[in-house]
Image (tube, rainbow, N blue to C red):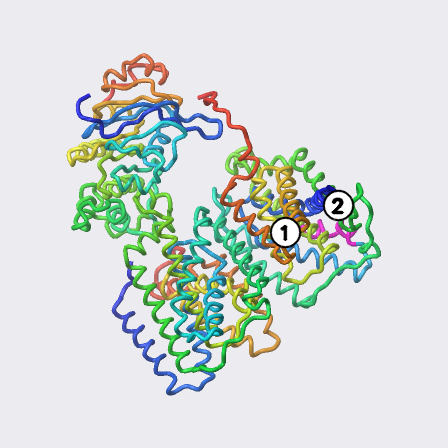
Amino acid sequence: MHELLAVVVNALLAAGLYATMSYGLAVIYGVMRIINLAHAGILMLGAYVTLTLYDRFGLDPFLSLVLVAPLFFAIGFVLQRLLVRRLPSGGATPSMESLLLLFGLWLVLQNLAYAVWGGDTQSILTPYTMRAVDLAGVRVGVPNLLVFVAGAVCLLLLQLVVKRTNLGRAMRAVTQNRDAARLCGVDADRISAQAFGMGTALAAVAGGLLSTLYAFTPDFGRSFLLKAFCIIVLAGMESVVGVAVGAFVLAFLENALGAFTRVPTSFQDAVSFTLLVVALVVFPQGLPHAFRRVTPRRPALR
Amino acid sequence: MGPEPLLSVRGLSKRFDGLLALEGVDFDVAQGEIFGILGPNGAGKTTLFACLVGALAPSAGSVYFRGERIDGLPNHAVVGRGLVRTHQIVRPFREMTVTENVAIGAYFGSRGRGRGAREERVAGLLQRTGLAHRANTLAGTLTIGELKRLEIARALATEPAVICLDEVMGGLNPSEIRGAMELIRWVREEGVTVLMIEHHVHAVVGVSDRILMLDFGRKIAEGPPNAVVNDPAVVAAYLGDPALIGGGA
Amino acid sequence: MIGRHPRRRLVAAIAAALLLLLAPRVLARGMLNDIWSVAFAVVLASAWNLLGGLAGQVSIGYSAFLGIGAYTTALLALRGVEPYATLPLAALLGAAFSFVVGLPTFRLRGPYFTIATIGVGEAVRVFASGVSFTGGSSGIRMPPASFDFALNYTSMVVLAVAVVTLAAWLRGSPFGAALAAIRQDIDAAEALGINATRYKLAVHALSAALVAAAGSLFAINFQYISPGSVFDFRLSLSIVLMPIVGGVGTVAGPVWGAIVFSYLQIKMLSVPALRDSYLFLYGTLLILVMLFEPKGLLGLGKRLLRALRRPARVANGA
């Protein structure tokens, strides 16, 4: 029983991080119908920038998020204007051109990281990295707990922006129907740029959080990217809540596999890959859709 | 009704997540008929066609073609059995020429029926649909009227027993409409049974043997054209001024 | 569907093939090694193009098939089987695995299919590194006895010529027309009687078998394979980039892409400073192609030719 509690607690903590990491992808996909493979590159860069801020200026990785977020918002905004905007986007189905373009961008970012920071494995060691506390009888690492808190704060802020601000409303409108939103006076192109900036900022923040938990190299983003895909497919792109649920499902499966079976850790990544394929094939519109009750109704008005 | 109907639909329903697009639709179509389908926007007409050819699986009910139950079969399998449809919003293969487009239908749609002289068949169809002069042009450069005819030629190339025409007259001018009506009559003379969805009520009335009227996914009338257009339920559905329907061409 | 001047192209192709086959009498070993590498790249690029370019299904997981071919040959050779005799089995296993990948994923469309293939490719790599009978992450060394470079060279060149010929023939055939229809509008294709899934599975199997055969020849020529060398994601990447940069969907495009890539790679490996910059190169090429000329080098070439042929007319925009 204690084992199960440990799995749940650890999964919950991991889910906060996973959700933050995934939501950036979801925003960009929702508003622009673009699958942003460069997300992995941004995750990685966020980690490296956090590392540099820590090494050079002694800035605590959690505090530096305050700097990282706006910096990467600006970077994302500029990237959208420079590159992404020139492509056909916003159609009903995501385009292969944008997929491959952002893939190319990811490769360039990787090379950039190799050039600036080298290929050695890096990690961030703060005074509290090795400390642990007791949570409901389960021993958890301090960084894990802080990451969860940071992630949760991030998502709460996000919920606020999405539900309460005009930007959020405009984004939701464009996500649901780009043309209709434009007819209502929404500047869809500017919203796209802002959404891309937001997605990039979120990815960088997630990268910063990841840097406190894992060692990393420029090759770092790929498995997290696949996990993020898995989560947003499960979430059905519906809402922050959907992403949170999907994140928990994945985190729970990974932790349960590690705790209750003898599958070696190197195979655990395969969990997310397999789940991704399963999710795409079985739940193409996400879990919330699959569980929605279907009550027949006739069209209400002509 | 005489010999067994070629196409028989019983209790067909289709639900999308809480929206009931079709509800318990029944009808029969006899060999050689021209069968019109009318109804306001959103009545479920295109959904009906999609269910017939297997592009969508019905939520309930059955479709019988030549005595064989075909609901639930995939689209390509239904086409192989001789039932094909055109698309309301045309879907040409834009990077292929007109001839290549029609050839796709000829090569892959007709299974084991008349394999020989495919090219002749394609050329003949292009001739009959007035596309012969555009035979080697890329489909992406055609006008909407030409694209509609390409859609028909391509579907006919599959040598169907039944063809479902979905608003082929949409966006055509009056002389083009007359040309389309002639084409439809020719198709029937070739031995193909025709189902057609149309908004041009007078065109449908002018060409059909029988008409089915849908509203909100349900059948509200079925029978010879004059009976249907004068049916009070039909008149009400179109917010009816009787002069608007059946009075024109 | 066959391009203009098919006879001219056929003559050119035969001439090129003959030249390549006669090359060992004239060229130095170093150059022959380079030609082997280019031929290898041509096989991979052209084979991928059958599914990715003709049928329009972009898979970024092809290193799995390469690895399967390589490991089949290596493992059997270690048990005493004549390496070249393992080729048919390697190709067969590659095709068989393509069904494992294709059956669940071909339901997906466009980018979703692509992402699923990335997932599958990664899963295969993780599996191969972890399982012991493949020698784990340290790889396998082939039994040294029978290394015969002349044979290796000839077999790779022959395979390359065969693949390109197959691609050209396929493109002009009804099978190729079906693939083109599937690529342009899969629903419309199905609405005309094409069983899209069956065609996708078929071309995938053919493509995978060819890549697996190349993998076999790779193992035979390099004598040493490891999960890092044959199941690598970067390899899957290159396999995709070559035809895209060269001209996806055409016959000559993947060949040009393979030549350019191999050349660049050989040049870059010899300059120490540039050795790790291949990512930057691949990435920039992808970005440039997608932004400016999705039809790749071949598309660029055609545009230039058209511009050159009409110097007096005002350009109307491509």
Please tell me how crowded label 1 is: few (under 14), some (14-19), or many (20+) other residues with Cα within 10 Å.
many
Question: What's the mark number on residue A150?
Answer: 2
Q: Relative to A188, does residue C167 appear above or below in the rendering?
A: below
Say which element carries label 2.
Answer: helix
Tell me the quarter of the image containing the N terminus of chain C. bottom left
Can see residue A98? no
* Residue at the spot 30% in from the left edge and 29% down from the top edge: B197
Examine the image and state in which quarter residue C130 appears: bottom right
Question: What's the mark number on residue A156?
Answer: none
- Percent position of residue B125, x then y: 20, 44
* Residue at the spot 64% in from the left edge and 59% down from the top edge: A220
Tell me the quarter of the image containing the C terminus of chain C. bottom left
- Percent position of residue B223, x then y: 25, 19
Q: Relative to A36, does residue C253 appear above or below in the rendering?
A: below
Q: Relative to C72, does residue C178 appear above or below in the rendering?
A: above
**Three-letter code for the amino acid on which mark 2 is drawn:** Ala
Residue C100 lies within the magenta run:
no
Distance between mark 2 and mark 1 Cα atoms: 21 Å
Q: Earlier in the sequence, mark 2 or mark 1?
A: 1
**Image-based side of B28 in relation to C156, left or right:** left
Q: Which residue is mark 1?
A: A76
**Image-based side of B55 in relation to A1, left or right:** left
Say which element carries label 1.
Answer: helix
Host chain of mark 1: A
- Percent position of residue B139, x then y: 31, 48
Q: Which residues are magenta?
A: A61-76
**Image-based side of A82 in relation to C167, left or right:** right
Depth order, front residue of A125/A206: A125
**Image-based side of C312 in relation to A292, left or right:** left
User: Magenta span: helix, strand or loop, mainly?
Assistant: helix
